Amino acid sequence: MTRSRRLLVLALAVLLLGGLAVVLVVRAAARTEQTREGDPAVAGGRVTLDRPDGLAFLNGAQGPHRGSLVSVAAREPQGGRTASGLNCKRFHAAGGTGVCLVSTPGALAQDNRAVVVDRELRTVRSFPLAGTPSRARVSPSGRFAAWTVFVSGESYGSAFFSTRTAIADTRTGALEGDLEKFSVVLDGKPYAAADVNFWGVTFARDDDTFYATLATAGQTYLVKGSITQRSVTTLARNVECPSLSPDETRIAYKKRVQGGAQLWREHVMDLRTLREHPLAEKHSVDDQALWLDDRTVAYALPSEGAADTSDLWTVPADGTGAPRLLAPSASSPTRLG
């Protein structure tokens, strides 16, 4: 092959590769625009936990603010989002205190931490986590924070999984690192077993009472616990990820509706009578719901056509009505103010 022919072949190859690169860039851009379609605008700014009539959640939309805690006006939850510099896997706040579960990739393993923040999102305390972040809750006064992590397995539907649930005093830093050390009364009798697991704490206003899920021997239970007494008592079966209503009379929770499968239906239970009713949402909800008020429950469902993203929905707590989209590409909602 002559020198001029070699140069011609090289030039053609460069043009072909350049054209292919342009096509790939255009296709990638088209995919990016497609994933962003319908998502509200997100801009960096100041986010505080005492914003009047505000709603906060983790932003799931593609872009530089993915995973950031954002705030919106509660009356316009699908409006523009203000993004903080706080990035979490799970978040909840109450009483001017927030807890952010962080998972940062490391050279050998992920660095998982529970970060307690004040109303300006400044770090107050930080606790190492024993596993992958799963659930987070703050007591109404802001004094206590609880979190659940997976220490094996990656979902509540896995054949084998273990959780660890902790409660921390955000004022003193005192930590109950494992609820499995609390005494258990099951069906009226003291109970102990090696397979006891807890998850999904929700707090009452008295800064002592809490509710959670206890799992043992293939069953799940709603338990009522006391922080000071370091004890829990079972109340009902087949209750997971409870959430206490603002008036403290009811529990919203996910109930397994098919044994051995990852299928749950959102229910509400009256704590006085233990009577329950299903909510209007027919999809399987694998989330710890949040009460927006005494009449409305919010929860996350996987987004249609978008991997690793969820949308927030609401449904009436009395079992009537129909699900309504609260915010697309979002998770871990919390009321502000």
Image (cartoon, helix red, strand yellow):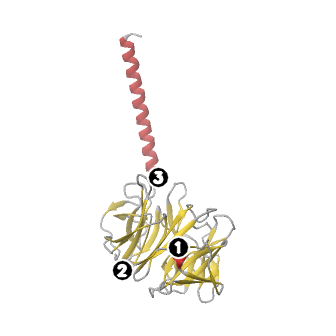
In the rendered image, residue 86, in percent from the top left (x then y), is placed at 36, 64
Mark 1 residue type: Ala
Q: Is residue 24 left or right of residue 181?
A: left
Q: In the image, which is nearer the foreground, mark 1 or mark 2? A: 2
- Crowd around label 1: few <14 · some 14–19 · many ≥20 (10 Å): many
Name the residue: 52% across, 78% down: 296
Sequence-wise first label, 1 or 2: 2
Given residues 251 and 144, the one toward you in this image is 144
- Name the residue that disc number 1 marks: 289
Front position in the image: 316 or 260 = 260
Tag shown at residue 172: 2
Could you give the CA–CA distance between mark 1 and mark 2, rounded to whole angstroms? Answer: 28 Å
Quarter the N terminus occupies: top left
- The residue that label 3 is drawn on is 35
**Residue 83 location, x and y as percent?**
35, 63
Residue 178 seen by the camera: yes
Question: How many marks are shown on the rendered structure?
Answer: 3
Mark 2: few/some/many CA within 10 Å (<14, 14-19, 20+): few
Asked if the residues shown at circle 1 and circle 2 are in contact, with their CB atoms under 8 angstroms apart, the answer is no
Q: Nearer the viewer, residue 281 or 153?
A: 153
- Vertical arrangement, residue 336 with respect to residue 205, above or below: above
